[in-house]
Amino acid sequence: MKDMNEGQYDLVAEKKKEFNKPSEAAYLNARKASDMGNLKLVKEFIMEPYIGHGFELEKGQVVHYELIDGPQILDTVYLVKSRPSEEWADTYPTSQYGALTYREGMHFYSNHPYMRPLLTLIKDTVDYENLKAKYGDLAEHNFVYPGGRCQVAMHEQAYGEPNLYNCDWGLLEGIAKVAGVEVARQTKIPNTFMHFQPLAYDKQPTNYSLFSAKDVFKRGDHVQLLVHDDLYVSVSLCPLGDQHDMSSKETLTTFPVKVKIFEGADGPLETAPDPQFKSMTQGEFIKNGFKSTPSGRVGDKNSETAFK
């Protein structure tokens, strides 16, 4: 730990180690089961382009997304089945306790005040040496971004035509299919978790560069995620597809993707513990008259960082 008095104490870095540790055993157990072929197939299906896909996952299962005919960007969101309009996989705590790009062993945490692991990335077969050889040391393919998903006005601006298929609408459709239209109406689509999208956060001011997926991935490449609670899942196959030629809407190329759902050989796998935080929900905070407990102190002219 660095000296707090020098202003160098990194609260996030220190708390990250502590917060992620209880979930490590479940990750290692699931990874071992996958590596040893001790997962039992429960369901398998193909997701086709230009429609939103919705399905359910159960606690202790593993979801497997696989490239079959060509490279294809995936946009995914996860809602807790018991309270889909209240709790979902959220990119802010996920990035806080992981990163903006994620690798094996990192967790998708839910929104505040729950902030518990909902999924863990247990396997990623992509050749990172090849990816980085093509596009540099910062190149990744799993990532989050503010909002994350492509939206209809962006496509209209880029390609001059309204109502083109976009991930925002696809994810809304997927939520409606799995959770019902009323839940879709109530839910503000959470920020999205992306897979198989070559990029690098390499610009100044900070932003990303997007790259062609040609020769980055291979048939059979997949990611697997351990599921820590019963979830509704919505997936959109991004219309940018292989991200190879985005110069016109006619050149965008999109491929189907295979989904497999597994569980352990003897049933559901071990899952991560719930930290069971006691803070109020938004509704409770409003009902309580917006009362919170102050932290720290109010600065004055004698404070160390006060302007002189």
Image (cartoon, helix red, strand yellow):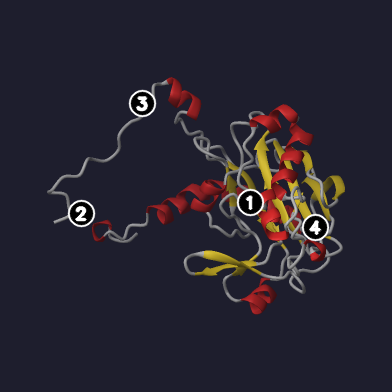
SS class, disc 3: loop
Disc 2 on helix, strand or loop?
Answer: loop
**Quadrant in which the N terminus appears:** bottom left
Quadrant where the C terminus is found in the figure: bottom left
Q: Residue at x 83, y 65 (%)?
A: 70
Query: Is residue 100 among what the camera can see?
Result: yes
Could you tell me residue 95's position as x and y percent?
A: 53, 53
Query: Residue 291, labelled with which disc?
Result: 3
Q: Label 3 to label 2, Cα distance in Å?
A: 28 Å
Up/down of 188 relative to 182, above or below: below
Residue 264 location (% of width, % of height): 77, 45
Q: Secondary structure at mark 1?
A: helix
Point out the frontmost of discs 4 and 1.
4
Classify mark 4: helix, strand or loop. Answer: strand
Q: Nearer the viewer, mark 1 or mark 3?
A: 3
Other-residue count near label 1 (Cα within 10 Å), few / some / many at <14 / 14–19 / ≥20 = many
What amino acid is at disc 4? Glu
Q: Are marks 1 and 2 in contact (CB under 8 Å)?
A: no
Foreground disc of the pair 4, 3 = 3
Camera-side residue: 75 or 267?
75
Label 2, on which residue? 305
Alpha carbons under labels 4 and 3: distance apart: 47 Å
Q: Is residue 281 left or right of residue 60?
A: left
- Looking at the rendered image, the disc whose residue lies closer to the viewer, 1 or 2, is 2
As drawn, the label of residue 66 is 4
Identify which residue is drawn at 74% across, 32% down.
Answer: 179
In terms of image quadrants, where is residue 181? top right
**Residue type highlighted by circle 2:** Thr
Q: Are marks 4 and 3 in contact (CB under 8 Å)?
A: no
